[in-house]
Amino acid sequence: MLTAAGLSALLAASQLAYDVLRWVGAAYLVWMGLRMLLTRHAQAPEVERQEEPRFGRGLRRGLLTNLLNPKVGAFYVAMLPQFIPAQAPHAVMGLALAGVHVVEGLVWSAVLIGFASWMGGVLRSPAVRRFLDRLTGVVIVGFGVRLAVSE
């Protein structure tokens, strides 16, 4: 929606705005990755206390991650115009195409959630969780550093 409203055009036109957003996004990624790397997992007995998943917290984190990533806007600016017919209203068609992308992402996420639910027992084991947290933390820090040093 922000891309259709012209935010991506503003970021493309203003190098300073793009750089500020890029640095804030890079700092956020590095912070998230370091948090995953440095978090100590308590050695719990057989049954580990499970925290109830919080939809709002996950939504907020995902939204913040995407809003602070200038490459998301760059993706829409680079990809969507190729598929908008010349006679179509650009804002409406841009929102429709972005909506298709969102639906595809939701379907993919639903498949991943289904698989994770099916593999829940294995994925909840402390050793696997530690390994996945460390691996994901390294990857996220890498993305943040790459975003910070890329032109």
Image (cartoon, rainbow, N blue to C red):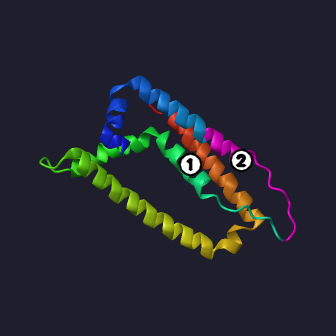
x and y, in percent, of residue 99 in the image: 34, 56
Magenta span contains residue 38: yes
Q: Secondary structure at mark 1?
A: helix
The residue identified by callout 1 is 60
Q: Which residue is mark 2?
A: 37
Task: Please state, as top left, top right, bottom left or bottom right, where the N terminus lies in the image.
Answer: top left
Towards the viewer: 47 or 151: 47
Look at the image and give the residue range highlighted in magenta: 30-46
Q: Comparing marks 2 and 1, which lies closer to the viewer?
A: 1
- Front residue (pair 8, 60): 60
The picture quadrant where one finds residue 2 is top left
Circle 2: residue type? Leu
Report the side of 49 relative to 81 (left or right): right
Q: Which residue is at a point 68% across and 42% down the rendered structure image?
A: 34
Residue at 66% x, 61% y is: 53
Residue extending farthest top: 16
